[in-house]
Amino acid sequence: MDAIANFAAGEPGAPSAAIAVDGLTKRYRDVIAVDNISFTAPHGSFTALLGGNGAGKTTTIAMLLGLVLPTAGRITILGRDFASHAKSLLAQMNFQSPYADLPRRLTVRQNLTIYARLYGVQAVKARIAQVARELDLETLLDRPLGELSAGQRTRAGLAKAFINRPRIVLLDEPTASLDPDTADWVRGFLARYAQEAGATFLIASHNMLEVERLCDRVLIMKLGRIVDSGSPRELIAKYGRTTLEDVFLDVARRGPLEVAT
Amino acid sequence: MTGSLRRIGAVMLRHWYLIAGSWPRFLDLCYWPMVQMILWGFIQTFLVQQSSFFAQAAGILLAGVMLWDVLFRGQIGLAISFFEEVYSRNLGHLLATPLTIGEYMAALMTVSLMRTAVGLFPATIFAIWFFGFSLYSLGIALVVFFFSLIAFGWAIGLFVAGLVMRYGLGAESFAWAFIFALAPLCGVYYPISILPSWVQVISAALPAAYVFEGMRAVLIDHTVRLDLMITGVALNLVWLAVGVAGFLIFHRQARERGMLLQVGE
């Protein structure tokens, strides 16, 4: 068993942050996609990456999953260096992204079975039944993914993202293709999972209401850098605004009040 | 080790679901080897009537085409299995699991082995029924020939899959281009000695050339040439090392360039 799994969040001896990023940089030839960012996400926290297109949110998440190699910097997950322990750490992580699909010719159940086995889930059938119940997928389990609506596919993608009961969840636009009612329901699911499993979430989102509802910390990114950070309430107060969306627009159009370190 | 086998099994299960869930895909596995076998079977029947050489070396063309299919199906089977992940934009999901790149390569090779065996077996049975030629008459040498050819196919397949991972689906056509370029050099239907001397130098580096020379030795001279087998196996080790190294290098480059989440249709 992984030594990290012996610590619960907040216990003496437990790593101080579930995710710690230090000086992370990604450069593609002349383009700097992520520029020397550092942040930590405490155990059990919801952290949002906010930023316009090309801000570096997806690249940051991809580096945390090992899908993109950083040019510089260090990633520590659950107290261990990600570069040295990627595969054992990935067993405790999962993600959902609009840039990755599940095979559409396979049924939802087949997809979940494959990923349950890849993640080493015990009692695969029972876990699939549970996650299908939690995400209201029971009647869709034996339908090919390609026959589902965009919203249903998003829920199937979320089922895959939670199939291994991850301790670290990385979500890129998790409710983008959902109707308001389903999106609200999914946010409730995410909040319940975080509370029950003590999981740590990092979410890239354009939906400010979602971020306000779920996240205890927001990192605002622009041109690959973290230009401001704080809780939604702190940021709203700092910019003298009434919503996080207004804060986002201020930063996007005029820049941050001060650059965070 | 158990975890490793479970993950390899999960990738194999993914391809089993895909093939078992679609009878056209299953039929496609068997269809082309069968068509090739029938075409070359009739050519051989005609040549046997015209030439004393073919009359004495019965089955030489049929054995050639079926063994060639081992190489071809082995290579395409691996490459297509990889392309399926790219077409479905599933590669990012797959490679962000605990599945190691070595396990993934092992899974692709095993899927290729099964696709090749399933595709080729009906053709070998029909060859006995239609043309009275049994590929199994090659005896124990057939086992060496089969694994020598499929290993060479895996080496090329891994390299081509790596190219697609690094350069995207624009490189997909290499899956067919590479293997067809090799066909004239491997001496499938004729001895290497008829090739120009400078081409023979290239052929000498190809494990498949030793298999087809060995196959003719068995069918014409009724001799098992161990020297050819050993050279072929040794060359395969080199080619497999090149294929694996190519896949690993392209995988790293794809990660450096952020291709793993972008590659797809």
Image: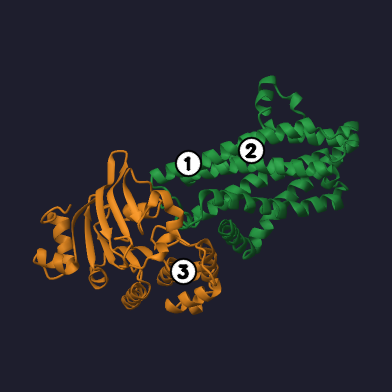
Residue B253 appears at what percent x and percent y? 43, 41
The residue that label 1 is drawn on is B250
Residue at 8 percent across and 66 percent down: it is A240
- Percent x, y of residue A209: 23, 71
Question: Disc 3 or disc 1, which is closer to the eye?
Answer: 3
Asked whether the viewer can see residue B172, the reply is no
Same subunit, labels 2 and 1: the answer reads yes
Which one is closest to the eye, mark 3 or mark 2?
A: 3
Q: Residues within 10 Å of mark 2 (few under 14, many from 20)?
A: few
Q: Position of residue B249 (x, y in %)?
A: 48, 40
CB of mark 3 within 8 Å of CB of mark 2?
Answer: no
Judged left or right of residue A8, residue A252 is left
Query: Dot 3, crowdedness within 10 Å: few (<14), some or many (≥20)?
Result: many
Could you give the CA–CA distance between mark 3 and mark 1, rounded to whole angstroms? 30 Å
Label 1's element?
A: helix
Q: Disc 2 versus disc 1: distance between alpha carbons?
A: 23 Å
- Total numbered labels placed on residues in the image: 3
Kindly identify the residue that appears in the image at 27 percent across and 71 percent down: A214
Look at label 3 and name its amino acid: Ile
> Are the residues under marks 3 and 1 on the same chain?
no
At label 2, which amino acid type do we have? Phe
For residue A1, side relative to residue B14 (left or right): left
Q: Is residue A8 above or below residue B53?
A: below
Q: Is residue A223 visible?
A: yes
Which shade of the palette goes to chain B? green
Residue that label 3 marks: A163
Label 3 marks a residue whose chain is: A
Q: Earlier in the sequence, mark 2 or mark 1?
A: 2
Mark 2 lies on residue: B180
Chain assignment, label 2: B
